Amino acid sequence: MQNKIKMQNKIKMKMGNLNQNKKQNTNQNEIEDQNQNQNQNQNQNQNQNQNENQNEKNEKNENEEKKLQKIEKQKIQREKFMHNARKTWLKLIEQWKNKPKYRPQRKLKKLCWKGIPPSVRGKVWPYLIGNGLNITLELYQVLKQRSKASLNHLDKTKQEEKQLYQEDSNQVLNQIQEIDQKIIFSEESKFTTFFGKEKTISLITFDLSRTFPSLKIFGLEGEMRDMLSEILGAYAFYRPDFGYVQGMSLLAGILLLNMDEYTAFRCLANILNSEILIGFYGVNEKLIQHRSLVFDHFLESINPKVYKYLITQKIETKMFLFDWLLTLFSSVFSLDIACRIWDVYFLEGEVFLYRVSFAFLALIEEQLLSLPFEKAFKLLLGHIEVKNLN
C-alpha cells in the first residue's frame, strides 16, 4: 500500500515537473513570439521611417527641381522680354533724335516699370533725364582742364611746402599764409583756399576706392578710376557752392558704368539739379525737415507698426532717409536693383523715391522689428543683409 502511495506521489511529481516545464516552455515561446513581434514591428517602423525619409527626400528634390525649372523659365521669359524691349527702346531712341520732346507717357511708364534693358540704359537714361542745364562737351572739357590744373597746382604747392619746411620752418608759415590768399578755383568759387581744395580732392580720392569696391574698377588700379575722378573734379568746379559731397561718387559711378564720360557728367549735373538733391547735398535743413515730416505722416498711416517701432527705438526718419535719397538708394541696394529704381525715378521723379522707401520698409518689417537699435540702424543703412531681397 505504501509502495503504491509512493509510486503515485512520484507520478504526481513527474507530472508536476512536466507541467512546469511545459509552462516554462510556453512562457519562453510567448517571450520569443513577443520578441519576434517586437523585432518585426521595429523593422516595419524602420522601413516605414526609411520610406518616409526617402519620400521626403524625393519630394524635396522634386520641389528643388521645380523651383530651378521655374527660375529657368522666368530667366528665359525675362531674356525674351528684354530682347523685345530693347527693340522697342531703340525705335523710341530713333524717334527722340528727330523729336527730342517726344514723350509717350503711357508707353514710357509701362516700359520703365518693367525695367530698361542694361544694354540700352546708356542711351535711354540721358533722354529721360534731359539736359535742362544745357551742358556741352566743350564746357565739360574746360571744367576738366581747370580741375587738372588745380590738382597739379596742389601737388606743386605740397612739394614746395615740403622743401620749404626742410629749409626753414619760419618760411613755411609765411608760405602757407600766402597760399591761403590765392584763388585756386574759378572766380565764382567759394573754395578759394589751398586747404579747401585739398579737402575736396582728399574726399574724392578717398571715395574712389569705396565706390562699388566689389567691382574693383574704381580702385587704385581700376580702369575707370581716372574717369570717375575727372567727372567728380569737374563737378566740383561746376558747382563750387557744393564742391564734392560724399555720395556723389556712387551716382557718378553708376552713370559711368552705363555711358561715356561726358554723357555721365552731363547726366550727373542734371540729376543733382533736382530740388530734392540740391536740398540734400546742400544740407538745406528746412527742406530735409519738411521731407522727413511728410514721410513720417505717410508712414504712420501706411505702416503703423514700423512707425511705432522707430519712435520706440528713437530712430529719426532723417537718420536713414537722408542717406537713401542722397544716393538714390545706391548705398542700400545692389547695383542691379538700384538701376531698376533709377529706370522709373528718371520718369516719375521724387514721388517714386518715397514709394520705394515705403516698400522697402514693408519688406524688412519682420526682420527690423526683431532687432535692437544698433542692428536696426545698420539694417536701414544697408550694412546688414536684407532677407528675401532679390
Image (cartoon, helix red, strand yellow):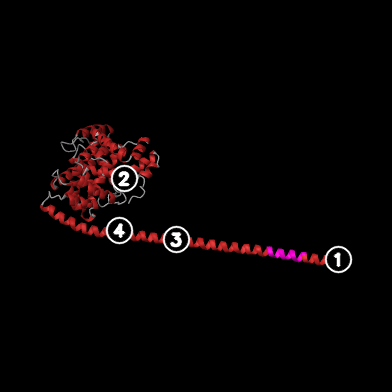
Q: Which residue is mark 1?
A: 5
Q: CA distance from mark 2 to mark 1?
A: 104 Å
Q: Which residue is mark 3?
A: 57
Sequence-earlier tag: 3 or 2:
3
> In the image, is 37 to the left or to the right of 325?
right
Percent position of residue 253, x then y:
25, 48
Q: CA distance from mark 1 to mark 4?
A: 100 Å
Q: CA distance from mark 3 to mark 4?
A: 25 Å
Percent position of residue 113, x then y:
23, 51
Sequence-earlier tag: 2 or 1:
1
Q: Which residue is mark 4?
A: 74
Q: CA distance from mark 3 to mark 2?
A: 35 Å
Q: Secondary structure at mark 3?
A: helix
Label 2 Cα crowd, 10 Å radius (few <14 / some 14-19 / many 20+):
some
Q: Are marks 3 and 2 in contact (CB under 8 Å)?
A: no
Q: Are marks 1 and 3 in contact (CB under 8 Å)?
A: no
Answer whether residue 39 is magenta in the image: no
Q: Does the magenta stretch mainly form a helix, a strand or a loop?
A: helix
217 or 380: nearer the viewer: 380
Q: Secondary structure at mark 4?
A: helix
| Residue drawn at (23%, 35%) of the image | 287
Give the magenta-colored segment's residue range: 16-27
Residue 174, by quadrant, is: top left
| Residue drawn at (10%, 53%) of the image | 98
